[in-house]
Amino acid sequence: MIMQLEDSPELKRLKSKMTVELLWLYILSILKKEDMHAYALRSAIQKRFGFLPGNVTAYVVLYKLQSRGFVKKKAIGNRVVYSITPNGKKLIKSAEKFILCTLKSLK
């Protein structure tokens, strides 16, 4: 029996590494376009990138990004809204450059 490529452990691991394990990249990418609260971020990630991060996972990543100065939060009414900082924009730009260089070297 021949395994389908989509079912291979290699491709499944790649997808996991490129999505959930790099959640910060997707969060910053969304926040680059608009400020958002955590729940809306999860929905936006699902809509734009095709996977839904865990509720707790998204909050943990947002907390780490905030503590490192890549996002900031502000209270608007009873919601906390996150926005990307100038350092967050620099970080995502560096990440994009690294990914493009890596992709280019794989071709």
Image (cartoon, grey):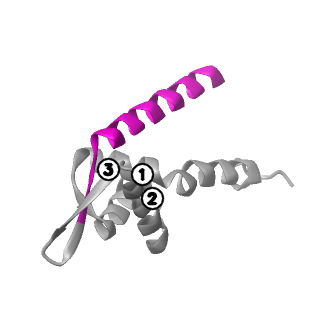
Q: Position of residue 95 (x, y in %)?
A: 47, 35
Query: What is the spatial separation of the Cα atoms under label 1 and label 2, in whole angstroms?
Result: 6 Å
Residue 107 in view here: no
User: How far separated are the C-alphas under marks 2 and 3?
Assistant: 16 Å
Q: Is residue 80 left or right of residue 60?
A: left
Q: Residue at x 40, y 57 (%)?
A: 67
Residue 54 location, x and y as percent? 48, 70
The magenta segment is: 81-107
Q: Nearer the viewer, mark 3 or mark 1?
A: 1
What residue is disc 2 on?
A: 64
Residue 45 in percent (x, y) is at: 38, 57
Q: Position of residue 26 (x, y in %)?
A: 42, 50
Q: Is there CB contact under 8 Å for labels 1 and 2?
A: yes
Quadrant of residue 12 within the rendered picture: bottom right
Query: Which numbered mark, 2 or 3, is in the foreground of this view?
Result: 2
Q: Which residue is mark 3?
A: 30
Residue found 83% across the figure and 51% down from its top: 2
Residue at the image position 52 percent from the left and 29 percent from the top: 98
Q: CA distance from mark 3 to mark 1?
A: 18 Å
Q: Are marks 3 and 1 in contact (CB under 8 Å)?
A: no
Can you tell which mark lies on residue 68?
A: 1
Quick one: label 3 or label 1, which is nearer the N terminus? Answer: 3
